[in-house]
Amino acid sequence: MHLYNLTLQPPSAVTQAIVGNFSGVRQQEIIVSHGTRLELLRPDVQTGKLSTVIATDVFGSIRSLAAFRLTGGTKDYAIVGSDSGRIVILDYDPRTSSFVKLHQETFGKSGSRRIVPGQYLATDPKGRSVMISAMEKAKLVYILNRDAAANLTISSPLEAHKNAAIIHHIVGLDVGFENPLFAALEVDYTESDQDPTGEAFNNAEKMLTYYELDLGLNHVVRKWSEPTDPRANLLVQVPGGQLASSERFDGPSGVLVCCEDHIIYRHMGVPQHRIPIPRRRHPLEDPERGIIIVAAVMHKMKGAFFFLLQSEDGDLYKVTIEHEDDEVKALKIKYFDTVPVASSLCILKSGFLFVASEFGNHYLYQFQKLGDDDNEPEFSSTSYPSFGMAEPSMPLPHAHFHPRALDNLALADEMESLDPILDSKVMNILPNSDTPQIFAACGRGARSSLRMLRHGLDVEESVSSELPGIPNAVWTTKRKEDDPFDSYIILSFVNGTLVLSIGETIEEVQDTGFLSSAPTLAVQQIGADALLQVHPQGIRHVLADRRVNEWRVPQGKTIVSAATNKRQVVVALSSAELVYFELDLDGQLNEYQDRKAMGSTVLALSVGEVPEGRQRTPYLAVGCEDQTVRIISLDPESTLETISLQALTAPPSAICIADMLDASINKTQPTMFVNIGLQNGVLLRTVLDPINGQLTDTRTRFLGTRPIRLVRVQIHGNPAILALSSRSWLNYTHQNLMHFTPLIFENLDYAWSFSAELSPEGLIGIAGSVLRIFQIPKLGTKLKQDTIPLSYTPRKFISHPTNRYFYLIEGDHRVLGEDAAAKRLDEMRQRGKMVDDNMLDLPPEVFGRPKAPAGTWASAIRIIDPVEAKTLSMITLDSNECAFSLAIVPFSARGNELHLVVGTAADTFLAPRSCSSGFLRTYKFTEDGTGLELLHKTETDDVPLALMAFQGRLVAGVGKALRIYDIGKKKLLRKVENKARATFSTAIVTLNTQGSRIIVGDMQESISFVAYKAPENRLLVFADDNQPRWITATTMVDYTTIAAGDRFGNIFVNRLDPKVSEQVDDDPTGAGILHEKGLLMGAPHKTKMLAHFHIGDLVTSINKVSLVAGGREVLLYTGLHGTIGILVPFVSKEDVDFISTLEQHMRTEQGSLVGRDQLSWRGYYTPVKSVVDGDLCETYARLPGTKQSAIAGELDRTVGEVLKKLEQLRVTASGF
Amino acid sequence: MSSELRYTANTQLEHLHARYTGTGHADLTKYDWLTHQHRDTLSSIVGHPTLTSYLAIADGESIGRVKFEMTERMLQPCGPPPRKDED
């Protein structure tokens, strides 16, 4: 078995974001790390929208990012700390729109190790040096400078190691142009490792240490080290230094030490200032629980600076420092606003705040004000004795604030993110859809959602109006060449033409010079200020002064097809003749003296646009009934001579020549494509060689069941092609590469560009008798998301086999359930305590829920109608129960009536796992599945993490035990438990079945094959894996094969020897297996690993599905960070050889951006086996032309053939 | 092996141990080994973004808190060391 791994949707979680002028122009940009991917975002200052400039896979895990700028420079560079054991400096090159690796310095082994630097990065604000640090001990300092040619240089590393020190955070201090200074938050474990009494551990001090890089001596010294709060977790740089010109201090320098509940200002040899972190006064909050800062950002403005710190509840605080020169007078904090909890905050100079959420969608906010003059209480260090440091070991009294809706910020844009995906299903439940949808349970806490993902571009409709009849075509046209917008809409009906003018309103006009008594074949704005209408009887050339020159067809003939551009007109007559006209310099349309007989009825014609600065386009494409397309010359030297011919498999229905940019073919200039739509719904795309007119590089694609119509349109300023069949598709250029994506919109019969003041880049289409005007707002997002909000983190969901509803379980740890919360509040009210109802009314999706102690759970079962995208009903679980698993079981003891069984547990603790009692709740479906009725609850001794229907009964993984239950009157009845060999080692997390075989996934001990022997009523483990695996998701590929994902980002396929499989099935009682000797302290047989691949994201679900109608089945997996990918089985040995050789070449050509070796990344834990990295192969399209042809030469193919193969693999497997 | 060689080999080994924290040796106690294992695991969890996300979701905490608590736990992941027998 060989598999091809392809990412359909890259991870959308942002682990870190940095801001800087990476293009070297004035505009600021944001680089975000998606863990394994770097993306450059450009915010549009006018519209406040974010757009992606580039996104690149780095084939490594990014752990830290920092922006820096050399002194006096105008361009920022990005420094990347990763798991490659190397420090990498990246430069964004706007010319080629790519990241360029400027420096790559190796310092250690690869992998996320304890003492190999890469976890933390700190830069000197003046851009002179950078410190990269590990979790423990190792810190390296590199000096950055520029050489004579102004190139960036990097020194060899200077060590600032400290043995036995755990590093919490590092930051670069702002000291102006004095020697660079770095601060680190460290804890030494030498003493607590030696002291058996535990006293040393209790007294362990967290040290704030300054490391000075002496630029003169070229080494690093520990300059200062002082203990600080033992619960400190984060350092923030405070501006400092003074300008040589003005003597004025930018700030006091030093750091803010963010601790649990406090923030301390700290610097060498100056008094400390301490303030409390204000907290919400929520009636249900635990006052003992500390609050920490999870994200921080400092912003410098002219002559002032402030900090925004974010707590783990999502509250932003504005912190300011009052200072006189370099002496701090007061440290102040006040509540600012509440936004989702961020992994990084970025402030842009243009007044935007980018919040890279740790889970869920990311947001761009615009600052409305800076919270300067509001009534928000402010807490200052001056109001406490000795600036809050009178008793450093004692906490300051709590400070409180009232959270409220956004006041200082306003939402500007939202970036959709699937992170985290916790479960998914792939099924086609929408009516009139021929491709399946992906349903993903996403998000965390109150911001969770169930999202339906459909492949296609989102369409925004602005106008939809009913027409008197059913038109068969629509056009828009300007009146003059240089008009900014269209003036007329022309609709062609079977027996007439309707002209509408576009103004304040759209209304019918008569005096346009167009013939209204006949249908129209083509409309064109021609020359400088004339219009042209082609109708079956002739051509009307309407001049600017409304004079009409008409050319009439000879008697007995009609025009059947026409193609036009700004200077040329070609019509085909019913007698299979072509007539060619060209506009002369006086604006007269002249017929070419000869007519060309084609010999077969012409079905379709197309000419390209006139290239800039030219008189004409030299090629005409003609599609004839004899299933051919001919390219005919329009060059004056060889007018109407046939140049080349292409045979087709069906008669053509439309042809469209368009010049579009596709960097995989030509990096700099648009390529001339001939798109041929056939009557059977197949689209051919060929490249027209501009020199000799030959057609090469044909690619085919099935679009739908109806004959195709093709329209050349403008999308976002670039030419694109709209292909209309039973679905509408758009062929467009995005980030220099060509894409082909369906529109999620009603089927269109015809469409055209539409440009008016209100919708400058719209499209107009007709669907039946309805005229629609619409836009395509976002190119590049190939999955449209429809969202159903949920209350708590989704755990799992299941679909009903007969009706279309979903049953979803959700639950949150450390959240008080509704009934428990109500009880607690009642108690408080009875005790006469004030309960602040305002706090209780805060919407949890914005403000979250108050954190409760561990072992507290809130959970619910939800019934969802995915087609209508709404919740039908919700059953909340009481008494601190949380649902962990569910199954729909047809109990044969109840005549195969379907029941929903939900596995829950009360008072669950996670590590070590324990619960007061587990339960199997059995529900009956009521009202066609829109409701549930609880039949009974069955107690279990452990948490039931996996449930599944099995032969008319229920099989449950209850902790370590595998059991089969049958339904009884008062509870479920335990029928059998696997006892023969030891139980599963940790906990059963996944179950799969075929026949009487059950495949069990253990939390830590991989997959076991279990046979159920009905005559003896035995569950027997007969095969398992030979390596431990922390299974998270599994699916059966066939009776002997299983695909599984583990917690460390691996996906693999295991197979059982078919002989063993048969032997086990042939043994009626299972006595043979029972007495067989175990192998390697496990089951008697072992599975064999067939394929293995590291995807870099934690696999949360695997589905075996076919994504295209009639296509092959693939394995679709989802990853926690929002990855959706597929594993496609190769069909032939030739493909395997070809693609693996290509992969090999790509490995050498395309080094990882973070310096990780691609092969070792994909084999992070176990070497890659039989899987080809499609993401790497697809970067072939972005290679420079010379490298492309060199690789293609090695493979004995042309570049076009390689690209075609890659596209074909993607399209046939996924349709994407 | 001459005594001189043994001497140099030892210093080299000591040097290596000082340099590569967490490397085992023949006289490693169970407690030391376990503490090293836990510290390695904890730093690996903090160093892998997907694992911190996973734990944060399971535990209902923010990623920042999970990272902080994991780093805090590195100080003494397996409790105080056992008392040394006086011999």
Image: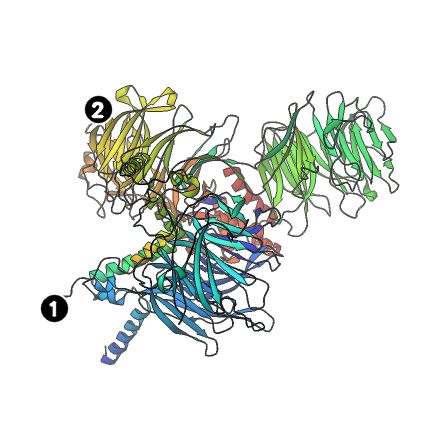
Circle 1 sits on which residue? Answer: B86
Q: How many marks?
A: 2
Q: Is residue A1015 left or right of residue A624?
A: left
Residue A595 in picture, x, y percent from top left: 83, 33
Q: Are marks 1 and 2 on the same chain?
A: no
Viewer-proximal residue, A77 or A569? A77
Q: Quadrant of residue B67?
A: bottom left
Q: Give the residue displayed 24% in from the left and 29% down from the top.
A: A937
Q: Quadrant of residue A327?
A: bottom left
Mark 1–mark 2 distance (CA, rounded to whole Å): 62 Å
Viewer-proximal residue, A405 or A612? A405
Residue A790 in picture, x, y percent from top left: 41, 35
Residue A593 in picture, x, y percent from top left: 87, 35
Quarter of the image with the N terminus of chain A in it: top left
Circle 2 sits on which residue? Answer: A970
Residue A315 in picture, x, y percent from top left: 43, 49
Callout 1: residue from which chain? Answer: B
Residue type (three-letter) at the residue carrying disc 1: Glu
For residue A310, above or below residue A435: below
Callout 2: residue from which chain? Answer: A
Q: Residues within 10 Å of mark 2 (few under 14, many from 20)?
A: few
Q: Secondary structure at mark 2?
A: loop
Q: Secondary structure at mark 1?
A: loop
Q: Quadrant of residue B31?
A: bottom left
